Image: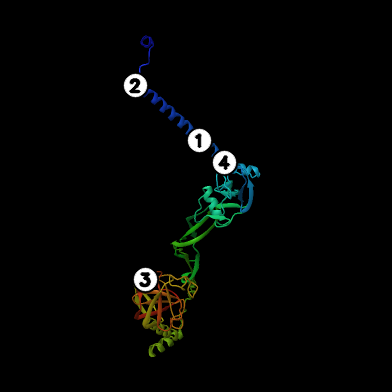
Amino acid sequence: MKEDEAVGVLQPEQTHDSQSSSMSYALRWKHDFLRQLMLAAFGTITITLLVLLIIHNQSGKEIHLVVDGRVTTVETNEAMLQNVLEEHSISLKPQDEISMPLNGSLQDGDRIVIQRAVPITVTADGNTQTVFTTQDTVQNVLNKAGITVQDEDKVTPALDSKLSEASDIRVVRVSKQQVQEEEVREYRVIKTSDPSLLKGDNRVVQAGEPGLIIHHIEKVYEDGQLVSKQVVSKEVERKTMDKVIAVGTKKPPEPVKEEPVVQAVKPTTVAKTTTKTSAKTPAVQPKAAVQSSSSSESKQNNVVSKAGIDFEYKKVLKNVSMTAYSSEQPGIGTKTASGTRVTEGRTIAVDPNVIPIGWWVYIEGIGFRRAEDTGGAIKGNKIDVYYDSLRAALNFGRKNGHTVYVIGPVKPESN
């Protein structure tokens, strides 16, 4: 029976593979349990930390707010700066500067600096604008506004000035311009007495020509408007030539009166007596005829021929020393001591005690000249010859041994 029973009942087959599967399942279950346990523990720790952090953040903090230089200490349970500002009704403009972001997290003892922007009126280049800025000087405000200032520009107040809430800044653009302006100087009309010309005979000795002066002028503009101008330099482009007219002062010769012709009556008896007497006595010339002959002989001795002109002279000066001068020299004007205008080829300076003013002379090697001027250094037998050009006067130098014929107030003319 036992054997049959044993045959009739199915017994599980005991093998090595079935034992291995059971152990693997047990190990996998154990590993999953440990992992879940660790995750639960990590979550618990995280939650605990978050709770502690929230509790810490919600605890009271002391914050120092510095607004426009004034320090205010506040206590708050807020974690962000924006909430603290709202809590204490502190409003900000977009232009204000703050030392930390509004969404920044606060820590106990934090120092928050707030600098408010102030409105500044800036006028430059024809435009006026209001600039909100936290800068402290005029220079920094202009730099922030992108306004460049040149060296010549005017800025009010000065660039290094400190700002106040009511400050206005004005930039004036300054520019300078160099220009040239012409000045025409009209010539004068000068009339001089000429004793060699008859009265009523006026001759132009020198044609007049207006002078031209170039002025170099600096003009100053402020914001495009002319505010000042000044002459920097000037130069003479063309000298003024005065018009000189010689006015004749010589009296015209008086007309010769014709004497009436008287017909002589032939004597009778007296004629014979006269004829006999004249035949015996020598002829005697009248006294007037003798004086006329003597005067004619004297004139013939003081007559010379120079430059193709025969003229009579009053006296002769020997070994005359000669120099030259010009109106271009400092202190030398164009008006002579006699009142005439200096003229090259005519004017000389003399000692009036030797040669009278207004008299003509003939200088060997130079020609006819007129004594019209004097000089402090002109004494005795010394003559100074006038030249327009200073260079020509200097080239003349000093000459000695000249012979000078003193003629008189009338210039000799060729026959």
Most foreground residue, 397 or 346: 397
Circle 3 Cα neighbour tier, 10 Å, few/some/many (<14 / 14–19 / ≥20):
some
Q: Which residue is mark 2?
A: 17
CA distance separating discs 2 and 3: 145 Å
Left or right, residue 56 beside residue 231: right
Most foreground residue, 123 or 189: 123
Which label lies toward us, 4 or 1? Answer: 1
For residue 2, which quarter of the picture?
top left
Most foreground residue, 103 or 378: 103
Numbered label attached to residue 52: 4
Q: Which residue is mark 1?
A: 41
Identity, as a three-letter code, of the amino acid under mark 2:
Asp
Residue located farthest toward the bottom when viewing the structure as drawn: 281
For residue 10, which quarter of the picture?
top left
Circle 4 Cα neighbour tier, 10 Å, few/some/many (<14 / 14–19 / ≥20):
few
CA distance separating discs 4 and 3: 114 Å
Of pointers 1 and 3, the one earlier in the residue sequence: 1
